[in-house]
C-alpha cells in the first residue's frame, strides 16, 4: 500500500473510535510501565531523564509542528473552497452582460458545475481520487465568452474569473494527496510513544499518579496524531471541508 492508500485507509476510522482506541493504548502503556518497572532510585532517575529527555522533546516538537501545519493547510483549503464558490457566482453575474439567451445558458452551466462538485467531485476526493482540471461546464463557459459580442473589458474580466476557477480547481485537486507523509509520520509516532514509555519509567511518586501521568501523555500524543491525519486529508474523514458554499450556489441559481 502506497502512502496515499495508507492515509485514506486511516481516514476511514471514525474519529471517536480512534480516540477510544488511543485511550485503550494509553492505558495499556501506563499499566505495562506500572507493572514492569520497579521504583527507580534518585541517581538512576537523573541518568535516564538525561538520556530520554532530548529525544522526547524533539519528537514532541515534530508532532506539534505537524499538527500546526496540517491544521493551517486545512483552514487554507476551506478558504479556497469558499473562493471557488464565490468565483462561480461572480461568473454568473458577469454573464448578465451577454444576450438573454446566453446569460440563461451561462446560469445553467454555473449551476451544473456546482452540482458536479457537490455530487461527484467531493465524494470522489473523500476516496482519494483526484478530480480532472477541466470540466465540460467550464469549457462551455469559456467558449461562451470567446464568441460573446460585448465590450472587450467584460470578456477580459470573465476570462480572469475563469482563470481563477481553474487555479482553485488545481489547488483542490492537489490537496487529495496527504499533506503529511504518513509512513514517516507513523515511524515518528512510534518513536515518540516509545520515548514516552521510557520517560515514564523515571517518574517518582505513587503508582496511581505514575499511571495517570503516563496514560495522559500517551493519550495526548495519539490524539494529536489522529488530528494530524484528519487535517492532512481535508476532504476525507470526520473533519473535512464541507460543500455548503457550492450548495448555496445551486440554491441561489434555481
Image (cartoon, helix red, strand yellow):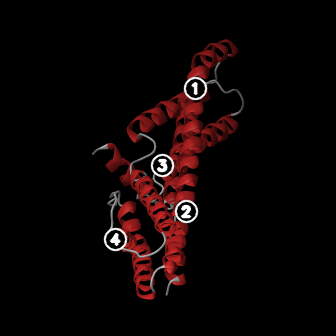
Question: Between tags 3 and 1, which lies in front?
Answer: 3
Q: Secondary structure at mark 1?
A: helix
User: Dot 3 corresponds to which residue?
Assistant: 232
Q: Is residue 195 among what the camera can see?
A: yes
Image quadrant holding the N terminus, namely top left
Residue 29 located left or right of residue 47:
left
Task: Rate crowding at label 4 as few (under 14), some (14 to 19) or many (20 or more) other CA atoms within 10 Å.
Answer: few
Q: x, y percentage for residue 109?
A: 39, 78
Where, by quadrant of the figure, is residue 203 drawn? Answer: top right
Vertically, is 1 above or below 140? Answer: above
The answer to whether the residue labelled 2 contacts the one labelled 1, judged by CB atoms less than 8 Å apart, is no
* Distance between the alpha carbons at the discs numbered 2 and 3: 20 Å
- Which residue: 59% across, 38% down? 64
- Which residue: 66% across, 38% down? 213
- Going from the N terminus, do you reach mark 2 or mark 3 first? 2
Q: x, y percentage for residue 216?
A: 63, 42
Question: Between tags 2 and 4, which lies in front?
Answer: 4
User: Dot 4 corresponds to which residue?
Assistant: 143
- Going from the N terminus, do you reach mark 4 or mark 3 first? 4
User: Dot 2 corresponds to which residue?
Assistant: 83
- Going from the N terminus, do you reach mark 2 or mark 1 first? 1
- Going from the N terminus, do you reach mark 3 or mark 1 first? 1
Amino acid at each position: 500500500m502506497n502512502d496515499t492508500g495508507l492515509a485514506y485507509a486511516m481516514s476511514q476510522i471514525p474519529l471517536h473510535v480512534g480516540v477510544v482506541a488511543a485511550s485503550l493504548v494509553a492505558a495499556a502503556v501506563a499499566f505495562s510501565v506500572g507493572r514492569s518497572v520497579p521504583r527507580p532510585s534518585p541517581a538512576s532517575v537523573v541518568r535516564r531523564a538525561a538520556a530520554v529527555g532530548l529525544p522526547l522533546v524533539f519528537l514532541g516538537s515534530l508532532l506539534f509542528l505537524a499538527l500546526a501545519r496540517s491544521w493551517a493547510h486545512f483552514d487554507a483549503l476551506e478558504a479556497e473552497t469558499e473562493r471557488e464558490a464565490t468565483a462561480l457566482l461572480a461568473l454568473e453575474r458577469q454573464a448578465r452582460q451577454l444576450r438573454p439567451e446566453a446569460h440563461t445558458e451561462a446560469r445553467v452551466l454555473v449551476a451544473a458545475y456546482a452540482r458536479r462538485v457537490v455530487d461527484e467531485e467531493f465524494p470522489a476526493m473523500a476516496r482519494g481520487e483526484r478530480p480532472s482540471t477541466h470540466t465540460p461546464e467550464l469549457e462551455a463557459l469559456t467558449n461562451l465568452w470567446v464568441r460573446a459580442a460585448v465590450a472587450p473589458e467584460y470578456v477580459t474580466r470573465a476570462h480572469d474569473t475563469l482563470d481563477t476557477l481553474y487555479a482553485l480547481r488545481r489547488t483542490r485537486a492537489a490537496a487529495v494527496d496527504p499533506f503529511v507523509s504518513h509512513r514517516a509520520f507513523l515511524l515518528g509516532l512510534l518513536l515518540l510513544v516509545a520515548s514516552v514509555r521510557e520517560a515514564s519509567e523515571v517518574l517518582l511518586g505513587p503508582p496511581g499518579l505514575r499511571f495517570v501521568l503516563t496514560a495522559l501523555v500517551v493519550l495526548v500524543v495519539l490524539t494529536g496524531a489522529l488530528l494530524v491525519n484528519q487535517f492532512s486529508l481535508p476532504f476525507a474523514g470526520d473533519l473535512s471541508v464541507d460543500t455548503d458554499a457550492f450548495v448555496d450556489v445551486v440554491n441561489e441559481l434555481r
